[in-house]
Image: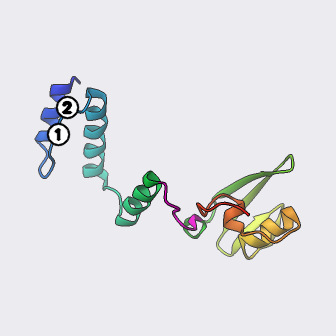
Amino acid sequence: MDRSACAEGLAAMPGLTVPPRLRAETLRRLLAYEIQARALGGLTAGERRMLRAVASGKPVGDVSAQASPGTHLVREWKGRTYRVEVTDNGYVLDGTPYASLSAVAKRITGTAWSGPRFFGLSGKRSA
């Protein structure tokens, strides 16, 4: 679609104003997103807040609380890659269950770490 066709498609959507001076590619993406969001549902308020925080460079907090069972977290440490599975009861590393990510990080490093920081989930710098 060219720019004018995208702009017409966006203008036909109730509650949406076509931003001026956007390139055709950007308008195509915006139109595609709006069609998909209206058909399948848009972002939740929490998802919008997290995206705004990421876009502004702010820390987004501990994402591990949102990790669903079955998710795999991967971290390389001293030349070895570790794969941790999130379960209903905690985490599993090399077949051994752990109650927290911090316990997993301690097992891997031998020292006390914030598990979410070690796995890059907290948005904060590691010590």
Q: Residue furthest top?
A: 2
Membership of 122 in magenta stretch: no
Quarter of the image where one finds residue 95: bottom right
Q: Which mark is residue 88?
A: none
Q: Residue at x 17, y 36 (%)?
A: 20
| Position in image of residue 99 (x %, y %) | 74, 76
Q: Which mark is residue 10?
A: 1
In contact (CB < 8 Å): disc 1 and disc 2: yes
Q: Residue at x 84, y 60 (%)?
A: 94
Whole-number angstrom distance, CA of label 1 to CA of label 2: 6 Å
The N terminus: image quadrant: top left
| Residue 60 covered by magenta stretch | yes
Q: How is the image coloured?
A: rainbow
Query: Does residue 117 appear left or right of residue 55 in this picture?
Result: right
What residue type is disc 2 on?
Answer: Cys
Q: Secondary structure at mark 1?
A: helix
Instruction: Specify the amino acid type for callout 1.
Output: Leu
99 or 4: nearer the viewer: 4
> Where in the figure is residue 91, as x and y percent of width and height?
72, 68
Q: Quadrant of residue 70?
A: bottom right
Q: At numbered mark 2, what does the secondary structure look like: helix, strand or loop?
A: helix
* Residue annotated with mark 2: 6
